[in-house]
Image: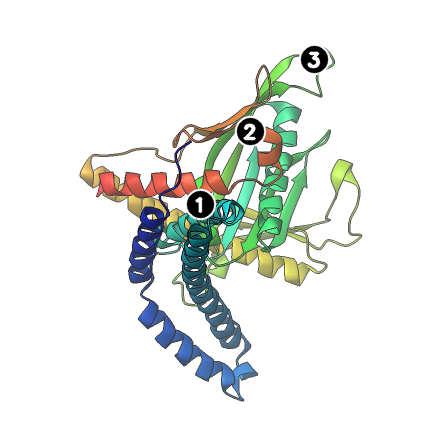
């Protein structure tokens, strides 16, 4: 086995880090951190709680990104020293440690490089994810619940909080639909590559003859809106229905009509929220979801108009985008990027980073082709 050319590897790492630093614009980042720090120190900051939350959140995000970058720079410096010591002393164990650390650093740099690709208009936002069971009956409902668990496990692994707005349970098992928010910077840019139709092939646990079943679930990802977003919704154009929340199998969760369904009459957009304790809270949460979907609808219409003008209508994110096959063999394969995993159990348990990174790189390539 050929020995690692550490000098060349470290030079390449430094070159990549330099490019990442230029894209992140570290000087501007430091200036903004200094400005936000002054605002945070102001004694009247929390007089306006919405602004305070925005300022502190932005400061935390920027400081985290800067710390991640400078931390990686320090690790590259430390690696260089470790290699020098190992080579001078002829220490095989130190060189083996250097090899392992090199691989870890390369993986971290690749992940940081992905962040530089998330520069779309809404990529920095938190994400609102909706999952809907498709064709396949009870297997599709069970698959929808599995996907929800997959995304929430992924969020848990990264320390991101998840807020569930609505869960509509199927009669026998699984979910008809679910909507939840992932509260993390760049959650939308990261998870938006998951939008589309997911397909599961397996021996159905619900079929007493043990036949193989194909089922589908749709995933929708939209950005969570901020106060500055220009989406105005006329209250007169919204139909409000209230009903009693229910759990799996029709079990009553609430003895009052606290669940809320909002229908935006002009577009036919329907959202529901039943996870808060009061009708008022559920209505406010449902309005957040409705506005996010109306923004996504607006952007989709604008893109469709541009595609029509260019004569280039493509359903890039439509229909089947990933297969999860559990029988007769086991594989998860993304049909857009070609990325695959032979461990579906790990993927369903939240091991999604490689699929997400491949999707983000694929999207950037597709955008360059369309430009």
**Circle 1 is placed at which residue position?**
192
Q: Secondary structure at mark 1?
A: helix
Question: Which label sits in the foreground, 1 or 2?
Answer: 1
Check disc 1: other Cα within 10 Å, few if <14, some if 14-19, many if 20+: many
In terms of depth relative to the viewer, which is nearer, 188 or 272?
A: 188
On screen, residue 93 versus residue 122, left or right, reads: right
The label number, if any, that marks residue 210 in the structure image: 3
On screen, residue 202 versus residue 61, left or right, reads: right
Classify 164 as above or below 304.
Answer: below
**Circle 2 is placed at which residue position?**
134
Choose top left, top right, bottom left or bottom right for residue 160. Answer: bottom right
Q: Secondary structure at mark 3?
A: loop
Distance between the Cα atoms at labels 1 and 2?
19 Å
Quadrant of the snapshot with the C terminus: top left
Residue 144 visible at all: no
On screen, residue 1 versus residue 287, left or right, reads: left
Q: Secondary structure at mark 2?
A: loop
């Amino acid at each position: 086995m050929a020995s690692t050319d550490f000098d060349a590897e470290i030079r390449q790492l430094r070159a990549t880090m330099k490019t990442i630093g230029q894209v992140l614009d570290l000087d501007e980042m430091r200036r903004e951190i200094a400005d936000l720090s002054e605002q945070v120190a102001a004694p009247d900051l929390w007089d306006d709680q919405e602004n305070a939350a925005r300022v502190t959140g932005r400061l935390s995000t920027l400081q985290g990104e800067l710390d991640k970058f400078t931390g990686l720079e320090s690790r590259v410096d430390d690696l260089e020293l470790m290699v020098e010591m190992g080579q001078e002393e002829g220490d095989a164990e130190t060189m083996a440690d250097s090899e392992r650390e090199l691989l870890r650093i390369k993986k971290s740099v690749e992940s940081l490089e992905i962040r530089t690709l998330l520069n779309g208009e809404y990529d920095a936002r938190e994400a609102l994810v909706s999952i809907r069971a498709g064709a396949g009956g009870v297997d599709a409902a069970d698959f929808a619940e599995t996907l929800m668990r997959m995304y929430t496990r992924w969020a848990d692994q990264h320390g991101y909080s998840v807020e569930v707005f609505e869960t509509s349970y199927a009669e026998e098992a699984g979910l008809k639909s679910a909507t939840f928010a992932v509260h993390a910077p760049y959650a939308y840019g990261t998870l938006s590559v998951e939008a589309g139709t997911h397909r599961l092939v397996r021996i159905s646990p619900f079929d007493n003859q043990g036949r193989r079943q194909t089922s589908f679930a749709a995933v929708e990802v939209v950005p969570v809106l901020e106060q500055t977003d220009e989406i105005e919704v006329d209250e007169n154009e919204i139909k409000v229905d209230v009903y009693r929340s229910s759990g799996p199998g029709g079990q009553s969760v609430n003895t009052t009509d606290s669940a809320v369904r909002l229908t935006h009459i002009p577009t036919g957009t329907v959202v529901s929220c039943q996870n808060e304790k009061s009708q008022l809270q559920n209505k406010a949460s449902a309005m957040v979801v409705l506005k996010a979907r109306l923004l996504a609808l607006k952007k989709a219409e604008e893109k469709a108009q541009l595609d029509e003008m260019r004569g280039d209508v493509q359903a890039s994110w439509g229909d089947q985008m990933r297969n999860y096959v559990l029988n007769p063999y086991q594989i998860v394969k993304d049909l857009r990027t070609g990325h695959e995993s032979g461990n579906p159990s790990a993927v369903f348990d939240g091991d999604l980073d490689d699929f997400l990174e491949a999707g983000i790189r694929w999207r950037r390539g597709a955008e360059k082709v369309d430009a």
